[in-house]
Amino acid sequence: MTTSTKPPTIAEAVAAATPEYRWVLLWRWPLRVTHWLSAICIVTLTVTGFYIGKPYFTTWGEASAHYLMGWARFIHFTAAGIVVGAAILRIYWMFAGGRYASWRALLPVKTKDWVNLLKTVQYYMMVKQEEAPRYLGHHPLQQFSYTAIYTLVLIHVVTGFGMYGMSNPGGAIYALFGWVGPAFGGIQNARFWHHVLTWVLVWFIPVHVYLAFRADVMDREGEMSSIFSGGRFVRADVKFEDE
Amino acid sequence: MARTKVVVDPITRIEGHLRIEVQQENGRIADAWASSTQFRGIELIMEGRDPRDAWAFTQRICGVCTVVHAVASLRAVEDALDIRIPANANLIRNLVHGMQFVQDHVIHFYHLHALDWVDVVSALQADPAGTARIAKSISPWPNNSETYFREVQDRLKKFVGTGQLGIFANGYWGHPAYKLPPEVNLLAVAHYLEALDWQRDVIRLHTIFGGKNPHPHFVVGGMASAINLDSTATINAERLTDIQDMIKRARRFVHEVYIPDLLAVAGFYKEWAAIGGGTGNYLTVGEFPETDVRDVGSYFLPQGIIVGKNLGEVLPYDHQKVKEYVTSSWYEYPGGDGEGLHPYAGETKAKYTGPPTPWQYLQDESKYSWMKSPRYDEMPMEVGPLARMLVAYASGHDGVQGMVNEVLGRLGVGPAALFSTLGRTAARGIETALIVDRMQTWLDELVDRVRNGDTATFTRDKWSPDTWPAEAEGYGYLDAPRGALGHWIKIRDGKIAKYQCVVPSTWNCSPRDPQGQVGPYEAALKDNHPLVDPARPIEILRTIHSFDPCMACGVHVLDAEGRLVTEVRVQ
Amino acid sequence: MFYPSSHPWVEGETLGEHLEDRGVSRRDFLAFCAEMSAVLGVGSAMTPKVVEALQQARRPSVIWLQLQECTGCVESVIRTGEPTIGDLVLDVISLDFNHTLMAAAGEAAEAAKHTAMEENRGGYVLLVTGSVPLENDGMYLTIAGRTAREHLEEAAAGAAHIIAVGACAHWGNIQASRPNPTGAVGVSEIVRNKTVVNIAGCPPIADTVTATIVHILTFGRVPALDRDGRPMFAYGKRIHDQCPRRAHFDAGQFVEHFDDEAARQGLCLYRTGCKGPATFSPCPIFQWNTRTSFPIGAGHGCIGCTERGFWDQMTPFYERLPDLAGFGVERRVDMIGGAVAVGVTAGVAAHAVATGIHRTRQRKALPVVEQPAAGKEHDRG
């Protein structure tokens, strides 16, 4: 409960008026900005990326009258730049963003968390649901999957810049990412993984959106709104695993 | 008198790595062994690949015969998948393959073979006026002036004067086997240099249709070069004119330089019309389909087999009668060394059993080569220009009969002279002249078709692997400049399951088979063959070069199970 | 047409004198030097230096070893250049050993090589085409009864400069591709103590080879090399970035099948699997066979032959993505990806339905309460 002299926010007011709930701030704006920028950019990158990989429609007539692939690439590279910016912000926030955004929350470490990982899986399989552990931030399964997504994005960024740098072997990008081709055993292998792993991102989106909505519906504790507002109302008498 | 063992390794001025060993007795060759000393395993590497890529892989078998393995592979895949290419594509492939013949044969004559007959150093003593007189008497070629030959000779004199002889160092200059008068030597040296520039020009036909040479690009189902008279990026009037001029220049050079030189040189070496004959069996699968490759009757040069030098009968060719043996080769067959396998069944493991390096002699080994021994109906077969010209001659091919008779007449010898080292070299020239003239016909037909609105160069019917049967097998063949070439492919689930080539130089350079029959190189070297000085084996070079060996082509292996690598490491 | 000179090289003559004797005017010679400077990418400011270097050059010895290969690189190099320039380049070097062209054979050939190596020890340029097979003690290639490796090590020891010409000498090429039955490797795998210049390509363009030699003779050092040892003046840019059809790529104008309407308009070959975007090579600029054309110019996509591992990396040639060993799904990767996406979505929907059913059952199992205490029954579990 806040002791500010300023007028309470609506959240604080509601929390004060309904003592059985409390409001916790989980995701401050840098994390929310990171999330939404990445979400928009990943969708953009996927759409433009698939066009670049296999241009599914073509234009006709004077070449100078069109710039379809040019725009697709421009948008792709711009979105990639934004994702990199967002990633840098996210990395900063791993150290400055508090416990729920911390690098410590990337993967389960304690034995208890590992046990809880199993229980969470059981919960989603609708087995022993009463034993499901409650987390304020990410539960171990989320930690795993989101960290996997970070890794995927990292691979995409590295392979992407590896390919991008080839257009100017004298340039800074090539100086930084010229090793990518040889490291993958050839730039075409890097291209292959860049393309194939995009599908994992595509598969992730419906699962992620569904589970977020599902949690919101099942728990009625504002999981969905937390990624907009930054916080959730939770039952005051529940003790969370990561509190 | 004891026999002297002679080793010539490397044989230079050929493609690849060849070792010849002979036993010399009384100035003649008593016995001979031909060893291919390189192995690359390309067919093994092709397994599991996309059959549409096969042409590029097989093309790398050889950079000299850069077109032939690509086209044989296209034909094998197109046979397996029943793809019928447009008429224009067939004509373009004929033009490309035709120029391959013409360019390759001229290079062979001047740059690979000529130095066996032409003494470069003797040309220094020539009277350029005499050379010009001889040249004018045999050809209207515009460079036949005294000034021109004097320039060449002065250049040669100063070149020799530097002491830096480069590629001419350590040649067998002054060997008594060189018979040309200095004036003719000078003529040949001048044309050696001219041909270097000529070949660079005419081969550009490959670049126009295939993007580059060596190793121009092809495509299963036709040719990639689209025809559009109204685009800068396609085959248009400008490109067609360029091709027309190249063919014109090629014809002129062949008729006014190559053929006159060939006849002039041959006139001084008539004794070689009785040397180096060899097996006497000749095989050609025919080449230059003028409608479709399936229509054997439409071939410009006919298919057939001649056995025992019998020009009275041309036997039909049946690829099922081809078998390969590994009796004398560094391979193993599941059924042992006595077994012969058809290429579809050919399953081979490399197994080197020769001595460690440095080698002394291989002739005492039971196995001595990376070449297998293909046999047709159990007989060794010579392939190449001589086989083609003999089969065409015996089949009554008008052009071939006319030209062969003319050449024989000019040299004052009978048809028996064809079965020899000189006959091989002459046949190569004769077919060059016939093919280069025929190229004009193909180009005219192509232009006619375009004029009538047919510009198709590719069929996409069976392009997608989704349209292919789960399993297919195909046989693609052609007669390459060096002789009969066959590619056998098995396709399973859209990938190459098995690939096997039987290549001209494998026929010609094959080692001994289980019956002890020697291969054509070996047979030729044993056939009335002189070798005067074992330290300067120029006679061996003459006969071996008359086959135009291409060793990289000849060596290959397939092991469907991929056991080769394991096997080799066990060694 | 070739017009041989009446003034070939004489002992002690510099190139400048030699050219003057040959009737090549100083103007022609300067033009050649300027052109060479341009080919080498050193800029016109360097032209005087090229002039000076070439005028003083004696014909240096060049030894050309041909190992496990197809001779395509030799064929390519003999197609080099315009008449005068090609001729000049041939006159500038003394080609003391080359299987394909040399007159001598057998022992005499080997002797010519050894003489050249001894007379020019530490000073000759070694060209190598072909790879070196290492499996089975190198028995997959023997020359004069000795293995390729022995020949290479012997020749490399006394060389001032080593130029690996073509993909075989560069990295092993086709014979080094899956599964590399002969254990083929490139020159730089054997010669580790000297710089190896890699003239990449299967085969390389002739002018790239000759220009590299001229660079070494002119400047006394090898040209600037990229990460893979390839000269920057030739391999500094991708085909894609120099392609005459690039405008069609940017415009989104693609050939889908050979000989379709787009192909007849000369549009971009990207969709037919062109590997120009992954390939560093001067093909669109230098072009092939005295600047006649190059593969894309003839309507076929690039197959990436200047890149290490291209037989495994760039195949299938008509697909954009490589066929990785054991993967086998490349051609249908998007189909599979899409199908899995549909499957995942269906799975999600099924899970949602299952959740609904499960929850309804749970509710029915609960005792009916008039005013449920806040959230009790909504707890997970």
Image (cartoon, rainbow, N blue to C red):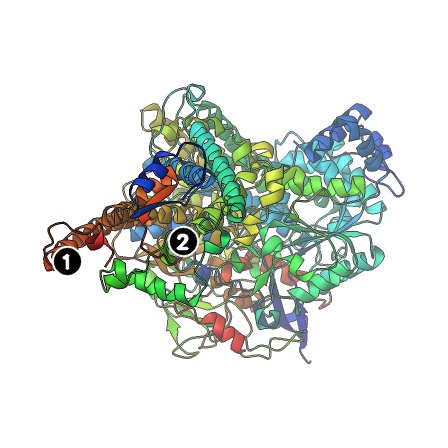
B448 shown above or below C189:
above
Q: Position of residue A78 (x, y in %)?
A: 48, 32
SS at mark 2?
helix
- What label sits on residue B26 in the rendered view? none
B228 shown above or below B69:
above
Query: The C terminus of chain B is located in which quarter?
Result: bottom right
**Residue A52 position by quadrant:** top left
Return the chain for callout 1.
C
Return the chain for callout 2.
B
Q: Position of residue A170 (x, y in %)?
A: 64, 37
Callout 2 amino acid:
Val
- What label sits on residue B391 in the rendered view? 2
Residue beneath disc 1: C362
Q: Position of residue C193 (x, y in %)?
A: 74, 59
In the visual, does B76 lie left or right of B409?
left
Query: The N terminus of chain B is located in which quarter?
Result: bottom right
Marks 2 and 1 on same chain: no
Q: Nearer the viewer, mark 2 or mark 1?
A: 1
CA neighbours of label 1 inside 10 A, class few (<14), some (14 to 19), many (20+): few
In this view of the protein, can residue C288 be seen by the observer?
A: no
In the visual, does B233 lie left or right of B252?
left
Q: In front here: B384 or B505? A: B505
Q: Position of residue A66 (x, y in %)?
A: 41, 22
Q: Residue furthest right?
A: C12
Question: Residue at (61%, 31%) from the top-left corner?
Answer: B140
Callout 1 amino acid:
Gln
B151 shown above or below A18:
above
SS at mark 1?
helix
- Marks 2/1: CA–CA distance: 91 Å
